Image (cartoon, grey):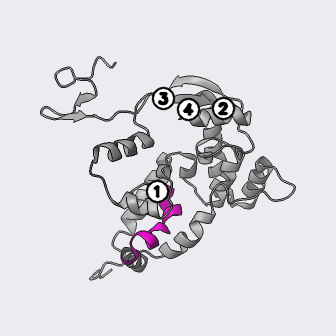
Amino acid sequence: MNSKKQMLEGMPWTKKNTAHTYNVYPIYDWKTEDIWTANAKFEWDYNKLYDVFYRAGVPIHSMRVASPFMSEAKSSLCMYRIIDPHIWARLCARVQGANFVATYGKQLDYKSISLPEGHTWKSFVKFLLDTLPKESAENFKMRFAQSIKFWARVGRGLRDDIIEDLDRAGIKYHLNGLTPHGSKMLKRVRIVTPPDHVDSLKGEHSSVTSWKRFAITILKNDHTCKYMGLQPTHEQAKRQRGIMEKYKNVGIKGDKK
């Protein structure tokens, strides 16, 4: 237990936030199944949007309520047509390209992409890099190298079921303690040499490093490499802020520029 953390009257899962407020975590480290079991058993109130997700056939582990235009949420944009057609119509009218992403964005995921004949995923990544402009190719090479080094030296926290999947698939890895953030309950997995692909895993393909994941990142034109779980570099973040500042008044009514 963290000796520096101030708790409310010594109670676990509480943490002093400011002089007069505390964060309280009454539900700690529950699985999705535990939450829905409790909802049914105790008749707790919850967002009924999840009922709509369920009727639409969305698995409970894939139900999420968040901004529709985060990188992770693009593939589920089409659900808005089912959940609330009126909001979807307004969203399409306001956000250019929303309908295109909803129609085609889901196709560009791990399972939907097949390997061209005569290639491994590693050789296909090299082929794709050779077709890119020099600046873009160098950015991807730098980010891929960072990812490979991070997985080899530090590793990433993975759930036990994913680690069991790695065992079944025969993917070599090393355990490196527990994650130093969040619940600190995830085992940190190091993979020294990225596998060509992790197709044999039951799920969570994008959470494990592989050359196929690098290829998808390029095909998504994902220069910040969010698909790989990376944050934008300092230069990328600075450039984005500069662009947003430069064009923040474009399209505003009454702008005389």
The residue under label 1 is: 239
Q: Along the polypeptide, which appears first: circle 2 or circle 4?
A: 4
The reply to whether residue 131 is visible in this rendering is: yes
* Residue situated furthest left in the rendering: 20
Judged from the image, the secondary structure of the residue bearing numbered disc 3 is loop
Q: Nearer the viewer, residue 226 or 202?
A: 202
Along the horizontal axis of the image, is 136 left or right of 193?
left
Outermost residue on the right side: it is 118
Q: Disc 1 marks which amino acid? A: Arg
Taking 41 as reference, is 163 above or below it? above
Separation of disc 2 and disc 1 at Cα? 32 Å
Q: Give the range drawn in magenta.
A: 67-86
Quadrant location of the N terminus? top left
- Image quadrant assignment for residue 103: bottom right
Q: Mark 4 points at which residue?
A: 160
What is the CA distance from the residue labelled 3 to the residue labelled 4?
13 Å
Separation of residues labelled 4 and 1 (CA atoms)? 38 Å
Q: Mark 3 points at which residue?
A: 179
Q: In this view, does 4 lie to the left or right of 49?
A: left
- Tell me the SS state at disc 1: helix
Query: Which residue is drawn at the image coordinates 53% and 45% (left, top)?
Result: 230
